[in-house]
Amino acid sequence: MADEKRPLKDLVGKMVVTKEGKRIGFIQDLTFETKTGELIQMVIKNPTPHAQNLNLERTNVGEILIPHNSIMAIGDFIVVSEEDLR
């Protein structure tokens, strides 16, 4: 992913899909490294059944987390590599 800057409001609420087109859910929030501002992960809301079946990291309240290194593209959707989620 290019190191382009985007406002948080442009990403929250976007659909996250795999490069194969399988839906994961919507971005609820983003986690950043406080010192560098580097994106760490995306917090997913309304996860799909497909996302529920993936062995993804979760918060202590059960929210699904998608690591930043799985992001392939940002446009109308956030496209992630399913291989990088495992």
Image (cartoon, grey):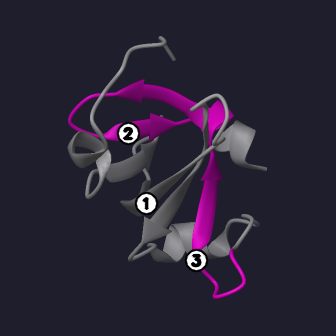
Q: Secondary structure at mark 3?
A: loop
Q: Circle 1 sits on which residue?
A: 29
- Residue plotted at (64% across, 88% down): 61
Q: Secondary structure at mark 2?
A: strand
Q: Position of residue 16 (x, y in %)?
A: 40, 50
**In magenta segment, residue 67:** yes
Amino acid type, mark 2? Ile
| Residue 34: quarter of image | top right
Q: N-terminal of the two: label 3 or label 1? A: 1
- Residue plotted at (53% across, 68% down): 50
Q: Circle 2 sits on which residue?
A: 78
| Residue 64: quarter of image | bottom right
- Residue plotted at (67% across, 34% down): 35
Amino acid type, mark 3? Glu
Q: Position of residue 58 (x, y in %)?
A: 70, 73
Amino acid type, mark 1? Asp
Q: Nearer the viewer, residue 62 or 84?
A: 62
In the drawing, what numbered circle is on residue 63?
3
Drawn side of residue 72 relative to residue 4, left or right: right
Q: Residues within 10 Å of mark 1 (few under 14, many from 20)?
A: some
Q: Please report the bounds of the magenta region as a residue range.
A: 59-81
